Image: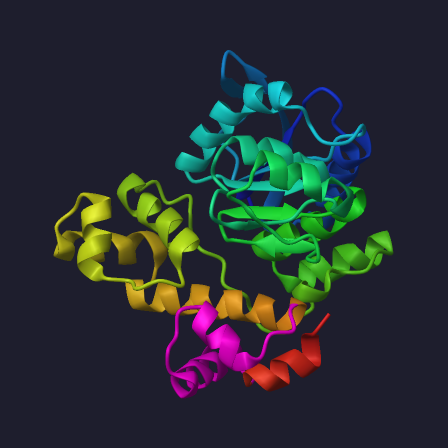
Amino acid sequence: MPRTIDIGLLEYPGAQEAALFGLTDLFEIANHPDRPHLKVTRWRAENNHLVPIKESRAPSAMIIPSGKLGPVTAAIAQEFAPGLRDLHTAGTTLASVCVGAFILGETGLVAGRSATTHWGAADEFRTRFPDVNLDVDRLIIDEGDIITAGGMMAWTDLGLSLVDRYLGPSAMLETAGTMLIDPPGREQRYYCTFVPSLNHGDAAVLGVQHWLHASFSGDIVLADLARKSGLEERTFLRRFRKATGMTVTEYVQRFRMNKAREMLQFGTEAVDQIVWRVGYTDPSAFRKMFLKIVGLSPSEYRRRFHA
């Protein structure tokens, strides 16, 4: 029996039914007997908790669909925020589509981080969540543990991105071809992107991962990481490697390179500016590491994949 990967869909008043049904169909189309099975469940709020409409374990990813009538009100969003925070703490990746980002914003989890939503809702989003680095020029922003997609129909791009994450690029391209929809440009790479392990069950390590995702461009000091985890340094290093399959240095390098890829593909900044923004001070060292991990130089990557 192939292993099952649970994907949750959040139901809330005014949620876009096209996204709820469309994502269900997309993940069903992606399933195949010889690869892991994507199981879709719907969730709702009860007493500040999220509960599945049918029995299910905590999902690997929880998707907040767009709303049909514009930005989600604070009253509705606050009803779902505690349950989403609990899932995130337990290792669930949170993803939003279009104005579903307003629910994500109420959790406080994207404060100080990058996110996108529908361009028409940008001003209201910035007013309600001034601490979020909103970039409505981007279709998808993948922060590892949090993913946001802009536009009402961006559920197709998000769905294909999750198929690529959990089933691989071949399954993603096959699903896109079956549905006659364009695969997201960022996911047409012939080499793997960095997908952090978040559902390993080690809460101390997960807390440090969440901090790294939000603070990847700053100085990373082992003693600080160990202190944030509440563990002795040697214990922290051992548990981090066991949980993520990488050393702290490897993890930070790969996450930084993944952010550099996005900046090269979707932005116009010079490579040397990107070097600084992702936490490097030596452009030569950055280029060598980028080539080692990505397989292309930064300039070649931008020529090939710039949107």
Quadrant showing the C terminus = bottom right
Residue at x 66% of width, y 54% of height:
140
Q: Is residue 186 above or below residue 147?
A: below
Residue at x 48% of width, y 79% of height:
290
- Kindly report the secondary structure that dominates the magenta region of the rendered protein: helix
Q: Position of residue 74 (x, y in %)?
A: 61, 23
Q: Which of these two is toward me, 221 or 200? A: 221
Residue at x 62% of width, y 41% of height:
126
Q: Is residue 278 magenta?
A: yes
Q: Is residue 178 visible?
A: yes
Task: Say which quarter of the image contains residue 67.
Answer: top right
Figure coloring: rainbow
Residue at x 71% of width, y 48% of height:
150
Q: Is residue 131 above or below residue 83?
A: below
Q: Position of residue 165 (x, y in %)?
A: 58, 55
Q: Is residue 8 visible?
A: no
Task: Say which quarter of the image contains residue 190.
Answer: bottom right
5 left or right, relative to 40: left
Q: Position of residue 171 (x, y in %)?
A: 68, 58
Q: Position of residue 236 (x, y in %)?
A: 20, 52
Q: Is residue 10 magenta?
A: no
Q: Which of these two is toward me, 246 or 206? A: 206
142 left or right, relative to 123: left
Q: Is residue 211 above or below residue 282?
A: above
Q: Is residue 228 above or below residue 258?
A: above
Q: Residue furthest top?
A: 47
What residue range appears in magenta? Answer: 267-296
Quadrant showing the N terminus = top right
